[in-house]
Image (tube, rainbow, N blue to C red):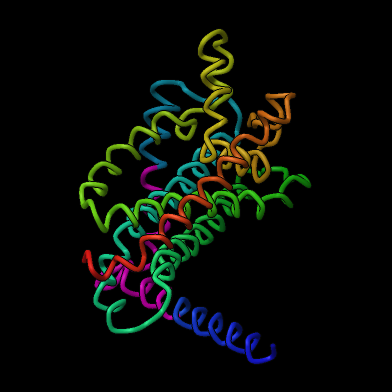
């Protein structure tokens, strides 16, 4: 029994060492040769924020009319940037690390996890930047901010699930990368990231119904929860406040769990064939 426990402990200790090494290497290589280096992880969402704020808030007047809206917009863009960075790098991770997987024996899922953890580090840096903007905007923080780690954990879980699925498919079908580039743009403009959800709900009728339906999407639900709990609990609608039925409220959470199970199951089932296919 003691030997079994020791083998399991050694296995997970080895996996952790490999994961830590891959994350460190990936994070260094991501901005290697760049003059600004890691600063690009902050500059990219900031530049996108500037463009979106000018176009949607200033020209199209799609704003909730509150002083916190710019910070809410920046937080939404930073959250989605984490999703796109994780999936874009993670779906190619098994193929890109093919030579390493053939030479060194370690669980294949580690290369996917390392890609998402690297993106999570960048997201953490962006959250600090958002915090600075929030303090400058005199945001009044509430006890809801204590739920932020849970929201980030759910966003990471659903992102990891999607990345595992696409990494598995990419081994067999390289077209997945091109398809995902289009799909992520559609999701970005369909979800309430660059426009306030309250703005759509105020229009009533079908618009309000579609806005509520969007909250069933785990990505939209978690990003709205992050905005609500971190910056603006008074102006950011969430699925917890829009629906009274707990079956509906828990739908995106259940979808997150099912998607994560499916991602792990399919990746694990096909991981032994990766070396042959590649």
Q: Which of the pair 90/60 is nearer the observer?
A: 90
- Locate residue 77 relative to residue 67 in the image: left or right: left
Which residue is outermost to the bottom?
Answer: 3
- Locate residue 231 relative to residue 19 in the image: left or right: right
Total residue callouts: 0
Q: Which of the pair 141/124 is nearer the observer?
A: 124
Residue name at image x 55 percent, y 80 percent: 12
Q: Is 41 drawn above or below residue 35 in the view shown? A: above
- Quadrant showing the C terminus: bottom left
| Residue 257 point in image, percent of width and height | 58, 47
Q: Which of the pair 29/259 is nearer the observer?
A: 259
Residue name at image x 45 percent, y 21 percent: 61
Which residue is outermost to the top?
Answer: 205
Residue name at image x 41 percent, y 79 percent: 106
Q: Report if residue 47 lies within the magenta region.
A: yes
Residue name at image x 38 percent, y 49 percent: 84
Q: Is 159 drawn above or below residue 249 in the view shown? A: below
**Magenta residues?**
21-48
> Which secondary structure is most common in the magenta stretch?
helix
| Residue 275 point in image, percent of width and height | 26, 70
| Residue 260 point in image, percent of width and height | 52, 51
- Quadrant showing the N terminus: bottom right
Q: Is 195 drawn above or below residue 104 in the view shown? A: above
Q: Which of the pair 69/149 is nearer the observer?
A: 149
| Residue 26 point in image, percent of width and height | 36, 72
Which residue is outermost to the right?
Answer: 143
Q: Report if residue 154 lies within the magenta region.
A: no
The quarter of the displayed image where residue 54 is located: top left
């Amino acid at each position: 029994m003691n030997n079994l426990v020791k083998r399991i402990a050694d296995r997970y200790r080895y996996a952790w060492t490999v994961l830590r090494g891959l994350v460190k290497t990936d994070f260094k290589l991501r901005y290697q040769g760049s003059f600004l280096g890691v600063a690009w992880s902050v500059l990219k969402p900031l530049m996108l924020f500037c463009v979106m704020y000018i176009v949607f808030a200033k020209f199209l007047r799609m704003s909730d009319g509150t002083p916190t809206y710019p910070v809410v917009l920046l937080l939404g863009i930073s959250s989605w940037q984490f999703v796109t960075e994780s999936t874009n790098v993670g779906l190619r991770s098994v193929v890109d690390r093919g030579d390493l997987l053939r030479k060194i024996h370690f669980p294949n899922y580690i290369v996917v996890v390392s890609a998402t953890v690297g993106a999570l580090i960048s997201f953490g840096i962006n959250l600090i930047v958002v915090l600075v903007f929030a303090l400058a905007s005199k945001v009044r923080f509430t006890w809801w901010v204590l739920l932020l780690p849970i929201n980030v954990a759910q966003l990471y879980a659903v992102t990891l699930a999607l990345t595992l699925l696409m990494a598995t498919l990419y081994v067999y079908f390289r077209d997945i990368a091109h398809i995902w580039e289009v799909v992520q743009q559609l999701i970005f403009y369909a979800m309430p990231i660059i426009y306030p959800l309250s703005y759509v709900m105020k229009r009533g009728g079908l618009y309000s119904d579609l806005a509520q339906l969007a909250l069933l999407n785990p990505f939209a639900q978690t990003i709205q929860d992050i905005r609500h709990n971190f910056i603006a609990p008074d102006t950011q609608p969430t699925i917890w406040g829009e629906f009274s039925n707990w079956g509906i409220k828990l739908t995106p959470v259940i979808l997150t769990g099912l998607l994560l199970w499916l991602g792990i199951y399919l990746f694990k089932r096909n991981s032994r064939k990766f070396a042959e296919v590649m």
